[in-house]
Amino acid sequence: MINNSKYHLAEGEILSEQRAIEDAKSNPARFEVLYNRYYEPILQFVYKRVEGKEAAYDITSQVFLNAMTNIKGYKFMGMPFSSWLYRIAVNEINQMFRSDKVRRAVKVDEDELKYVMDELKTAEETESRYQMISEALGELDEEELQLVELRFFEQRAFKEIGEILNITENNSKVKLYRIIDKIKKTLTLSKKSA
């Protein structure tokens, strides 16, 4: 089952974060607090999606440069500041893919695949099953893969996924369940041809 609690902040944390954001808006040197808080999670998010450490570092640097440059336009909409950073990261990653500067990567471990297997209602946990699911994930387009990664590998709530991808919460649910159906069909075809 997806555990969303780690992506939501307590009221005190939200207030602290809001103060840090307001400080950064008035003095760019104070952006460092936000940078230090979110650099590592954003870097890991990017690294799981691109091929090569250098590309991940470059993209992450661009994410924080864009965030610092545009912080005055940030408005609290009920989601953590990190959602805004992840949205910037998704846009930067997509821009790099479009310009062919980096290649997409799908880096998952067996624990992360278990969440997908649970959703697919697959009890059979064999190495070949993991391989088949990994291959099915590799056939997804970028938007589909982002939805799967955000929901199952990062265990984000649909509301936050919608915020990150700039779609509605309901749209993120509908799209994800269509993707799950697509993966199920791919696995069924793979099983029949085996």
Image (spheres, grey):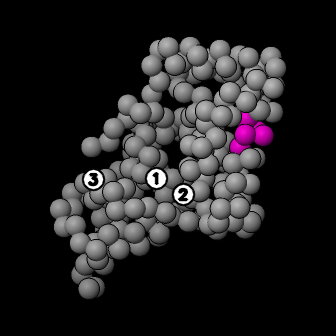
**Circle 1 is placed at which residue position?**
149
Q: What mark, if any, has residue 48 been given in the picture?
A: 2
Q: Nearer the viewer, mark 1 or mark 2?
A: 2
Discs 1, 3 touching: Cβ within 8 Å: no
Please name the predominant secondary structure of the magenta segment in the image: helix
Looking at the rendering, in which quadrant would you find the C terminus? bottom left
Residue drawn at x 33%, y 57% is 111
Dot 3 falls on a residue whose secondary structure is helix
Note whether 24 is above or below 182 in the view shown.
above
1 or 2: tag closer to the N-terminus: 2
**Of the residues shown, which amino acid type is indicated by label 2?**
Lys
Residue 60, image x, y percentages: 69, 48
| Residue 24 can be seen, yes or no | yes
Which contiguous range is marked in magenta?
63-67
Figure check: 77 above or below 143:
above
Give the residue at x 53% y 18%: 14
* Among numbered discs 3 and 2, the one appearing first in the sequence: 2
Mark identifier at residue 119 = 3
Q: Residue at x 73, y 30 (%)?
A: 32
User: Could you tell me residue 133's position as x and y percent?
Assistant: 35, 68
Horizontal and vertical percent position of residue 6: 41, 33
